[in-house]
Image (spheres, helix red, strand yellow):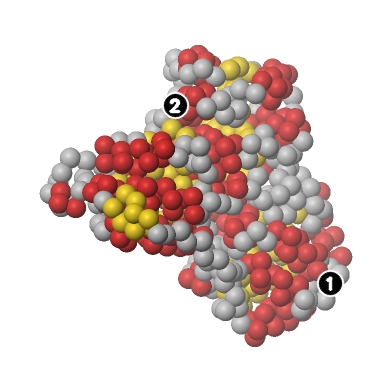
Amino acid sequence: MKQLTGSEIVIECLKEQGVDTVFGYPGGTILNVYDALYKHQDEITHVLTSHEQGASHAADGYARATGKVGVCMATSGPGATNLVTGIATAYMDSIPMVAITANVGVSLLGKDSFQEIDIAGVVMPITKHSFIVKNVHELADTIRRAFKIAKSGRPGPVLVDITKDVTANLADYEYKAPEEILPVTDTSKESDLEEAAKMIKKAKKPYIMVGGGVVAANASEEFRTFAKLCDAPVCDTLMGKGVMDGNDPHYTGMVGMHGTKTSNFGVTASDLLIVVGGRFSDRVIGNAKKFANNAKIIHIDVDAAEINKNIVVDASIVGDAKEVLKRLNTMIEQKDNAEWLAEIDELNKKYPSSYATDTLTGPTAINKIYELTKGDAIITTDVGQHQMWAAQVYKYKEPRQLLTSGGLGTMGYGLGACIGAKVGRRDKTVVNIAGDGCFRMNMNEIATAVRYNIPIIQVVINNHVLGMVRQWQTLFYDKRYSNTILNDAVDFVKVSEGMGALAFKATTIAEFEDAFKKAMESGRPCVIDAQIAEDDKVWPMVAAGQPISTCFSEEDLDK
């Protein structure tokens, strides 16, 4: 046992937890922690982002890409509040993250001191837990507890706020190995498993929907075995991408607002819907009263609070998806649903995914990225049309390949997440696909990538408008384009070059292909400004609040 300052205890606890990288931005109240970090820079790499929001998104992207806990740091006041959007993003998508902030000294709390804010109170609704540490003797155990909470059960972000005096005070420190995080199994009742197995055996038209919970549980292998045993078609939510190989013949694409017609119509026609690790988001189910009305529904989720929250189900199993599927797979006999699969195949033939192939569009650009990366890249996205195209067109082979803000829908998320993902997975090509509206929000993080020579590829799908909002204005607001036109003098190539990146502009498929090849070969941070038409739309779609059975495409508007 030895005596250390609070700041040194922070670093030692991070080392205990196996943390090798943190993302952050220093300031007055957290200076002691940064001074301790300086002394351990050979053990923990700190990535200085251009903005604290970039640090929180980078920690999130690191966590999604690696499966580890992401860590970000910021000082008090505005530094801490700048993390809030990133913390909320991680919370909505159940991403394990620990945010460490520093606050004013205990004697200055509650006095509206300079850069004082109750950040633990601010983030209470968007974290699994938030702490403020006012006693150095409680610091080590609080940090250890934060990591355990972030990783256990349904993962999520935790905030630890530390007063400045605690970072300077001395306390005894003794190394403790991290507690083993065991999967949640005690809630998985044998009777619930048996009921689900009976329903699966009886079903003639089963459909399986996979969500992000299967990614979090690292259960893709067990899920694929389960899908084969059920002999059922599989659709996914935005967060469930890659659990089922995008080229698997049983896979029918995404379900919901911008899901495929096959998935939306198939779920509607099914007699049993098995949802694994999904939360029945409004973007997935559309009109809740008319969702999968022909089907019995089985819901498997680690969080009991999700059962019957948005959709009332017929059977449920609460527990870790990996453990539940392992047990179910021993209880299910191999099924043969050839007739049902043939029906789904007819839907695939009737409603193929299609887009123009002769001009540069969002889909053609993303398809070219898929071809050139051979489907092996990690793709991060921002939010909007490009996000949906990335979900629809790129065929993800495995989990943790698509990193995107699903629940909160955070514009400006993708570039920070791309940096975090590349830092965590140096072996992968990592590409951020953004719209021009999103890229404007946090494009200063290109400077971060250049500073550390993190060779990411940033693709801007540039239509000079806020594309998704314009699409809604076109379809539902009589083309009243209120504040969605971005056709100004900003030149993303010049801006990116000004920050030190290699940059290209592409107006044709050939130019885009050439630029992307050069980006892959360069070993440098690169930006590609891909110019597309302002009125390209994402098809198919379901209007807000409508049943997914009303899914329509452009050709349907002419009928």
Q: Position of residue 470 (x, y in %)?
A: 49, 34
Q: Amino acid at mark 1?
A: Lys
Residue at the left extreme of this rendering: 111
Q: Residue at x 82, y 76 (%)?
A: 333
Q: CA distance from mark 1 to mark 2?
A: 53 Å
Q: Is residue 460 above or below residue 2?
A: above
Q: Quadrant of residue 518?
A: top right
Q: Residue at x 59, y 41 (%)?
A: 424
First in sequence: mark 1 or mark 2? Answer: 1
- Tag 2, which secondary structure? loop
Of the pair 170 and 320, the residue shown nearer to us: 170
Residue 390 visible in the displayed image: no
Of the pair 517 and 363, the residue shown nearer to us: 517
Q: Amino acid at mark 2?
A: Asn
Q: Position of residue 326 (x, y in %)?
A: 72, 71
User: Residue 444 — which label?
Assistant: 2
Residue at the front extreme of this rendering: 1
- Tag 1, which secondary structure? loop
Q: Is residue 164 above or below residue 126?
A: above
Say whether marks 1 and 2 touch (CB < 8 Å).
Answer: no
Residue at the bottom extreme of this rendering: 191
Q: Position of residue 31 (x, y in %)?
A: 31, 38
Q: Residue at x 84, y 68 (%)?
A: 337
As drawn, is 541 to the left or to the right of 398? left
Q: Quadrant of residue 514?
A: top right
User: Residue 335 — which label?
Assistant: 1
